Amino acid sequence: MRKKTGPAAALLLAAALTLSACSSGDGDGDSGSGDAASAVTDLSGRDQSGAGTALDQPYTKPDLVLTDTKGKKFDLREQTKGKPTLLFFGYTNCPDVCPLTMSNIAIAEKSLPKADQDKLQVVFVTTDPERDTPAELARWLPSAGDSSFIGLSGDFPTIQAGARQVGIGIDPAKKEKDDTVVSMHGAQVVAFSPKTDKGYVLYGESTSSDDFAKDLPKLVRGEKP
């Protein structure tokens, strides 16, 4: 069961959703992480950590113009207009949440008919643009998810402002005394309808590939799962 929320509750829910503390060393050795919250609870106290939450008052698609993996300008609103779109904010050095989320979506996408796979837009916006250049995103996305996924980079204030438009909090990457790089970012995926271009379903970080696979056919059609 999924709880429907109004606009005020939606903002509170988004703020309460998992804020992940992802950390990694400067090299490609061991990395660690910690969760700011181990589960997501909505206003009724019911656990929402692994399923989508449908919103009565959907989000407007962020007004974001960034740079894609080919070094070209990408206008999120214009270039995903009328297309089913999944939007996620994360970064390539994240040791767990980000690659797992991309992998789960990629696995679920492969269960769709080819025509629906071609329609679905999966957009990964980096929260660590200093390290996540377009070239780095182009290298990472096929291994973490799928080569069809769209990777976007740009200046951090623009990215942060875009994330806030859908209730997602992100902080700049921060280097600790032990040279560990820590980034705090909201781990929810926002699903946008191809009919209205509104974000009407939120998915938490515990959403499995099976959960996505169950919902994707309806999301592609613009229906609430």
Image (cartoon, rainbow, N blue to C red):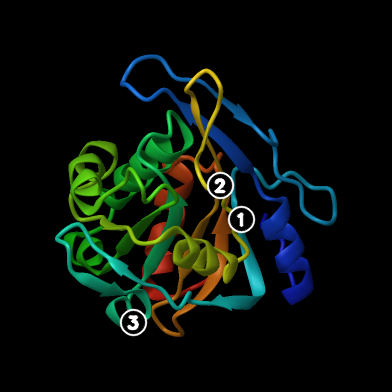
Q: Is residue 134 left or right of residue 6?
A: left
Q: In this view, does 131 lie above or below 150?
A: above
Of the residues under marks 3 and 2, which one precedes in the sequence?
3
User: What SS does tag 2 mark?
Assistant: strand
Task: Tell me where residue 200 appears, x and y as whole percent.
Answer: 56, 71
Depth order, front residue of 107/141: 141
User: What SS does tag 1 mark?
Assistant: loop
Q: Is residue 44 above or below residue 206?
A: below
**Amino acid under disc 3:** Lys
Depth order, front residue of 119/178: 178
Of the residues under marks 1 and 3, which one precedes in the sequence?
3
Residue 32 seen from this side: yes
**Marks 2 and 1: in contact by CB < 8 Å?**
yes
Task: Tell me where residue 83 appears, x and y as whole percent.
Answer: 32, 76
Q: Is residue 100 above or below residue 73?
A: above
Measured in 3D between alpha carbons, the distance from the residue under mark 1 to the one under mark 2, in whole angstroms, is 6 Å
Of labels 1 and 3, the one closer to you: 1
Characterize the local packing of mark 2: few (<14), some (14-19) or many (20 or more) Cα atoms within 10 angstroms.
Answer: many
Question: Residue at horizontal 36%, vertical 71%?
Answer: 84
Measured in 3D between alpha carbons, the distance from the residue under mark 3 to the one under mark 2, in whole angstroms, is 26 Å
Specify the label residue 182 is tagged with.
none
Measured in 3D between alpha carbons, the distance from the residue under mark 1 to the one under mark 3, in whole angstroms, is 24 Å
Task: Tell me where residue 38 appears, x and y as whole percent.
Answer: 68, 33
Q: Is residue 147 left or right of residue 66?
A: left
* Residue bearing mark 3: 81
* Residue bearing mark 1: 169
Image quadrant in which you'd find residue 217 = bottom left
Image quadrant in which you'd find residue 161 = bottom right
* Residue bearing mark 2: 185
What is the number of callouts on the image? Answer: 3
**Amino acid under disc 2:** His
